[in-house]
Image (cartoon, grey):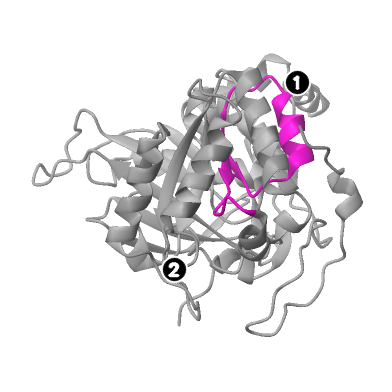
Amino acid sequence: MSASRPVEDLVLPAEPLAEPGKQLPLVFQAPRRGKPAKHWIDLSVDERVEAVKELGLPAFRANQMSKHYFERFETDPTQWTDLPKDAREQVATQFFPNLVTPISEQRCDGDTTVKTLWRLHDGSLVESVLMRYGVRRGLGDEQQSGVRSTLCISSQAGCGMACPFCATGQGGLQRNMSTGEIVAQVMKAEQVLQSGQLPGGAGQVNNIVFMGMGEPLANYKAVLGAVRSITDPTPHGLGMSKRGVTVSTVGLVPRIQQLTQEGLPITLAISLHAPDDELRDELVPINTRYKVDEVLDAAWEYARETKRRVSIEYILIKDINDQVERAALLARRLKARGDWGWVHVNLIPLNPTPGSKWTASRKSDEQAFVKTLENWGIPVTVRDTRGQEIDGACGQLAAQLKD
């Protein structure tokens, strides 16, 4: 196993965006900006009880309020008629501030993919993407069996990892999001699905992927708090299965190691994109700090400890990283760490972004890459590139106001 350096040693100051065509700096420390108001989500169970008592309300009101919020997705305490009327406004103001405000919404794929642009309290912009699968066409809006929903959420406003093929990374890092702001995206999606506004009828979020804006493990404390809020049993959290949550990272090795010890068997996704250090240094600049072997060692250890298969995310870029020789190298490096199904490769055709010098691989090269991995016995799939028309696919989120 390779030695790793603490991420704290790599903290760099926020710097202005580089000129077009120049490599942006890696930024690990988010710029300090005004914190959002503390939300019910941000409080532990014990803190919720104490906060309610400080308002002069009995302790049982804390559970009552959590049931409204986490079980029924009701976010406006002024409408909670089982609370004393004279306490509702104070509860709303103190514990349930509005953290994310919708600015615009775009839909595609027959209205089954929805990208929402959110404004945070300080004007920062982030995006989330809600996707429904298994919707049968021509059946109207009645509830359909077998329909599932995946929500892709943001954890930072912008991103400091500077990957040159990613619109978010090229926009730089504005700030970290709070646990409350992260989970608020989930609550809004739950309300949309519960109301039956999308094709397939009323439903709920089945899977959550931290693959929106930001590097989740660079905002570790808030992201971990969000994961716990999402997976804690109701009424103290949303009660989702841990197996339905995926956290993606470009490879912050110390944080992967920390996550390994948390006792949360969620899915870890590694944005690898190249099996060799020379190319990955260019495509994923964090590789200049943590090399491929270090990242894969940490991923393997996560799989061994949690018994959860790791997903290797690999964007296919024409004539850059899509050669069969690189597919074979990737397979060798994965197999060298174990042959017990610890890993799955998720290939992603490159999605177009403004000003990019790269494009998606030819279909023939994509197929050859897949075949090479399969010949090595590596489980592999090619991701469905949904949301391209609305710049909502992988690597396209830029959180910009449209004219």
Question: Can you identify the residue that label 2 sits on?
Answer: 319
- The single residue placed furthest to the left in the displayed view is 138
- The single residue placed furthest to the right in the displayed view is 9
274 within the magenta span: yes
Tell me the SS state at disc 2: loop
Nearer-the-camera pick, 89 or 92:
92
Q: Residue 335 at x, y = what percent?
A: 53, 31
Which quarter of the image is occupied by the N terminus? top right
Q: Quadrant of residue 114?
A: bottom left
Nearer-the-camera pick, 12 or 312:
312
Q: Is residue 394 visible?
A: yes
Q: Is residue 18 above or below residue 117?
A: below
Q: CA distance from mark 2 to mark 1?
A: 58 Å
**Residue type at the position of mark 1:** Val
Q: Residue 324 at x, y = what percent?
A: 42, 53
**384 relative to 117 in the view: left or right:** left
2 vs 1, front mark: 2
Tell me the SS state at disc 1: helix
Residues at discs 2 and 1 in contact (Cβ within 8 Å): no
Q: Is residue 282 above or below residue 290?
A: below
Q: Residue at x 64, y 33 (%)?
A: 299
Q: Is residue 38 visible?
A: no
Q: Quadrant of residue 262?
A: top right
Q: Residue at x 67, y 55 (%)?
A: 277
Q: Residue 6 at x, y = what percent?
A: 87, 43
> What's drawn in magenta, residue-wise?
247-276
Dot 2 or dot 1: first in sequence order is: 1
Question: Can you identify the residue that label 1 sits on?
Answer: 49
**Residue type at the position of mark 2:** Asp
Q: How many marks?
A: 2
Q: Residue at x 59, y 31 (%)?
A: 336
